[in-house]
Image (cartoon, rainbow, N blue to C red):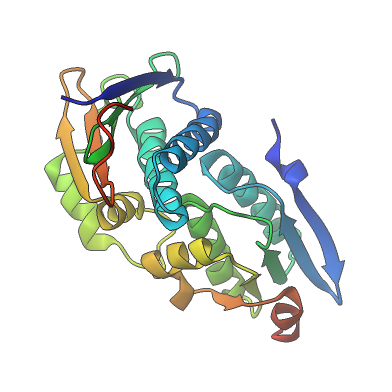
Amino acid sequence: MDSTKLMKLREESGIKVIEITTDLSSYAASDLRKMLEGLLAEKVEKIVVNLSQVSHINSTAVGALVGVAKRLRQSGGDLKICALADNLTRTFNLIGASSVVEIYESENSALAAF
Amino acid sequence: MSQADIQLQIPSVAFYIEPVRAFVGNLAQSLGFSRKRVADIQLVLDEICSNAVHHGSADATVGVKLRISIDTDALEIIVRDTGGRHSGEKNWLTHERLSEIEMNRSPSNESGHGIFIAKSLADMHKMQPNRDGGTDVRVAFRFSKPRNPEI
């Protein structure tokens, strides 16, 4: 199964928004990484990842988000995350990734932060 | 001795981790773990299975073995891999390698968080070489109160 079908890509005011509708364990995390790498290859600089419909995320997926955020910042862009369920916030906090990636309560606030 | 043992074997392919995670989540919920603790158990399982699939199995056909034991005090999960991903490759989990992973872990790293997560969230976490040349990762999650031994 191709989980990228469960990752909807759209654009809001020049910012790419990825809305994920599948849990992010290893298999889907790999597809997320491929999608993000594809956006980097297209020279996209601003990305918001909406996790409002995600109830599980593992460290592979968190790592993919952290890695792309760091690379985008080197070229003046960024990747921001929004709408995390409590247990996802705990995972980001446990790893320490919440100090590396900007996390917002809502998609609108993430978009407004660019 | 445990009251119940469940044994599973999955191919060493990431695709099969998700259904196992769902199964263990349902089991943990049925055993009375809180929603927060079920999420912890599922995350730990995901992390140790991911390590076994990506680092610890010679090929997909050999697979990763799981043993899930339920006793009166705890839910215990053992994940067994068979060793290096490529023929002739050493066991990924030497003591030196483990120390290196733990020492170099940083929030800004893209990988190397799985063992840290398992250690942080499980009530018990042990890793040891197995006779297949791989690694057994054993984690346990205690029940908040002892379970009825008849179930």
Instruction: Tell me: residue B125, above or below residue B24.
Output: below
Give the percent coordinates (x, y) of residue B110. Answer: 44, 58
Residue A35 visible (yes or no): yes
* Residue nearest the viewer, comparing A103 with B76: B76
Residue at x-position 86% and y-position 77%: A13
Nearest to the observer: residue B20 or residue B61: B20
Where residue A65 sits, quadrant-wise, is: bottom right
User: How many callouts does the rendering have?
Assistant: 0
Relative image position of residue B124 (x, y in whole percent): 20, 47
Give residue B67's position: percent from left, percent from top: 31, 25
- Say whether residue B59 is visible: no
**Which residue is rendered at x = 35% and y = 19% of the image?**
B7
Between A94 and B77, the one lying in front of the other is B77
Work out whether B139 lies above or below B3: below
Query: B84 above or below B101?
Result: above
Name the residue nearer the viewer: B2 or A77. B2
**Given the current orientation, which residue lies at the most extreme top position?**
B61
Residue under the point 69% across and 51% down: A35
**Residue placed at 75% from the left, 85% from the top?**
A112
* Quadrant in which residue A77 is drawn: bottom right
Would residue A23 be found to the left or right of residue B122 on screen?
right
**Residue A107 vs residue B52: left or right?**
right
Task: State which quarter of the image contains the N terminus of chain B.
Answer: top left
- Is A112 left or right of B112, judged from the image as shown? right
Check the picture and name the quadrant holding the C terminus of chain B.
Answer: top left
Q: Position of residue A66 (x, y in %)?
A: 51, 65
